[in-house]
Image (cartoon, rainbow, N blue to C red):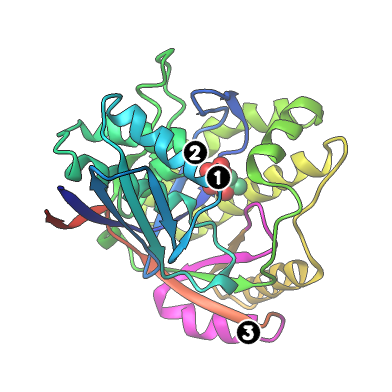
Amino acid sequence: MPLATATAHPNIALTKYWGKRDRVLNLPSTPSLSLTLAPFAATTTVRWGAEADRFTLNGRPADAEEARKVFATLDRLDPRRPRCEVRSENNFPTAAGLASSAAGFAALVVAADAAGGLGLDPRALAVAARRGSGSATRSLQGGWVEWPLGDAPDGADSHGVPVAPAEHWDVAMLVAVVAAGPKPVGSTEGMLRTQATSPYYPAWVAQAPAETAAARDAVLRRDLAALGEVAERSALRMHASMMAAEPPFCYWAPASVAAMEVVRRLRRQGVGAWFTMDAGPNVKVLCAAADATRIAEELRGVVAEVVALHPGGPARVLVRGD
Ligand code: PMV
């Protein structure tokens, strides 16, 4: 039976996807711009033809909901597919608390396309990844990636598109690890609650397109201060929208606030560092690669662990075989 193995990196958004204008198609209410980050990666093998659909994640049978999403993704790629065996591993230290689903779904669609000999258009793969996990559509591309709103009713034009490759700009992303453990509110539930109840949500959606355009511009000009400022605004506005939801929720822990303060203090001292946060307590810090060691040392004063990431390449096939 044919099989293929593919790998993909996670990504961190500088302007955020938070809100779904179509829940079934998984279409965003806001455009976003991200950086694909190495060395973390998911590596996924798909065997096209097996006794039963089976999904193993990091060496263990995955739970039913994870398996359902994986096989629904394969059904969308090929409604007449045979049963498949999927094995996925990721090399993220669990403590880094980074969601692995973006890298996982990106690697999955690339591996399935190769294993099944489907020869699908890269845009179709990016759309299938989006339906598995929104941010996965950005992990198919390396480096700086935009996910536009698109306007096709079926969502065919809402997927990650490259802005600049990994080699474009020598930056680092430091992950200040605040806590692992289950999230109080998952990203889908958080988005839906915010859009249903937060009076700030319409303002969040309204400001997003101009901010993503400004972020793209800053990336193309390699203007770290401009990009950093947009990124902090986007993160703070996204978090403000959820703090104003009903019931309100907040992903910040005391150490998250302490890490944000370290970044602000460094900036007052003339060091170029800017933070962002996602649906969890970790703080991610964007800086020039040359400043990463010094900034990481300062962050270690307030958090237990700091992981340094750098721009990574696109999702790709590693092995094809039988
Ligand atoms: O792709 P999801 O459903 O895990 O949502 C990601 C949401 C954020 O990480 C908070 C923002 C983003 O653009 O990645």
Q: Residue at x 63, y 57 (%)?
A: 277
Q: Position of residue 246 (x, y in %)?
A: 87, 35
Q: Amino acid at mark 3?
A: Glu
Q: Position of residue 21 (x, y in %)?
A: 58, 22
Q: Position of residue 236 (x, y in %)?
A: 70, 50
The residue closer to the viewer here, 246 or 295, is 246
Q: Amino acid at mark 2?
A: Arg
Tag count: 3
The residue closer to the viewer here, 88 or 308, is 88
Q: Amino acid at mark 1?
A: Ala
Q: Is mark 3 within 8 Å of ligand 1?
A: no
Q: Residue at x 35, y 22 (%)?
A: 156
Residue 287 lies in the magenta stretch: yes
Q: Nearer the viewer, mark 2 or mark 3?
A: 2
Local SS, label 2: helix
Check the image and name the residue furthest to the top: 153
Instruction: Tell me the quadrant of ligand 1.
Output: top right
For mark 1, what is the residue?
Answer: 64
Instruction: Kindly report the distance in space between the C-alpha atoms of the residues bearing marks 2 and 3.
Output: 43 Å
Q: What range is drawn magenta here?
A: 277-302
Instruction: Say whether marks 1 and 2 touch (CB < 8 Å).
Output: yes
Check the image and name the residue furthest to the front: 51
Q: Residue at x 40, y 38 (%)?
A: 71
Sequence-earlier tag: 1 or 3: 1
Q: Is mark 1 within 8 Å of ligand 1?
A: no
What's the mark number on residue 68?
Answer: 2
Task: Evaluate whether residue 45 shows in this view.
Answer: yes
